[in-house]
Image (cartoon, rainbow, N blue to C red):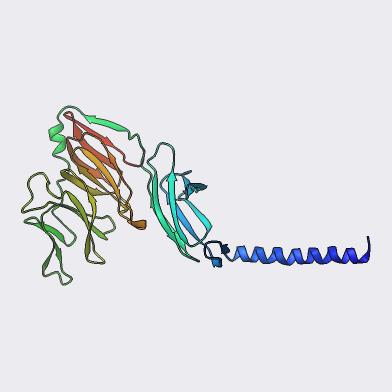
Amino acid sequence: MTRKIRRIILWFFVALFFVSSAIIVFLAQGLRFDFRSFNITRTGGIYIVTSVPDAKIYINDAYAQATGGLIKYGRLVENLLPRNYDVFVYKEGFYPWNKTIAVKAGEVVEIKNVVLFPIDLKIEKVAQADVKSLIKQFPKPATSTDGFRIKKAVLELLDANNDKWLPVANNVKYMALSPNGGNMLFATASGGAPPPAMAGENEIKVYSVANKKSETVLSAGETIRYIAWLADSSYFITVAGSDLIITELDALGSKRNSIRLFFNIASPLNYDADDDIFYFSRDSALYKTHLYTQ
């Protein structure tokens, strides 16, 4: 081998070293070439925490990773170019979760409250006899709590000086303050004073304590008979007609995930958020089920 050829080989490997180093630095800094815009841009990511381990994450229908961990089941999907992504989270035996997530350059979108609910809930009969006396032990729907009250079908808020009640919404029968105190959930009916069973609009709305604004979060389509929060304040439950609806509060990506369970509920009784136990009656018997901690 001549000296000239050896020099060519040497300079080839030197050039390869510098090019490889530049690519490594390029990628390490989160930079990628975007063929849509033909620009070099910084990438972003999506960090997802799920309620169950080994939940599979799909990005634009392509499998990315599965969630894992000892206490929190999370996973970071990195090196995503700035754009919208269809995110789908799935585990066998659970209802899937999906949203369109906008990723920005150099930022990580954190989604820390993806609760996957079991498809087959384990329903346990608590009692068959003397159900009426057991029902009386459950608390009645709240009409006042922590600066809120329902008076003559009007939801009112106590002002900052604690000396005046301010109207928030009319035609309200049920209310439920989130465990973190940040949002007041309430059910409305159209027309005048609500009838014994909610009718009309059959909407669930939420009032933000911080923003002092209300928005509709669910149109149930049937008579609303019960509302309550899950313990993390990220989901709420509604009994509409004889069905149980579980709805996500966060509207990230202009969508709230919601599932409807056909329980044939005769009477919604109580939801114990601390222990995740929903009590209800049907067929003259008392039942209970866990909604997500099976």
* Residue lying farthest to the right in this orientation: 2
Residue 124, how many percent across, how many down?
A: 28, 31
* Residue lying farthest to the bottom in this orientation: 161
61 or 190, nearer to the observer: 61
Residue drawn at 70 percent across, 63 percent down: 20
Examine the image and state in which quarter residue 285 appears.
top left
189 or 73, nearer to the observer: 189
Residue drawn at 37 percent across, 47 percent down: 115
Q: Is 132 above or below relative to 219?
A: above
Residue 123, how many percent across, how many down?
A: 29, 32
Q: Is 122 above or below relative to 161?
A: above
- On the rendered image, what quadrant is the N terminus found in? bottom right
235 or 84, nearer to the observer: 84
Residue drawn at 67 percent across, 67 percent down: 22
Residue drawn at 70 percent across, 65 percent down: 21
- On the rendered image, what quadrant is the C terminus found in? top left
Residue 113, how many percent across, how many down?
A: 38, 52
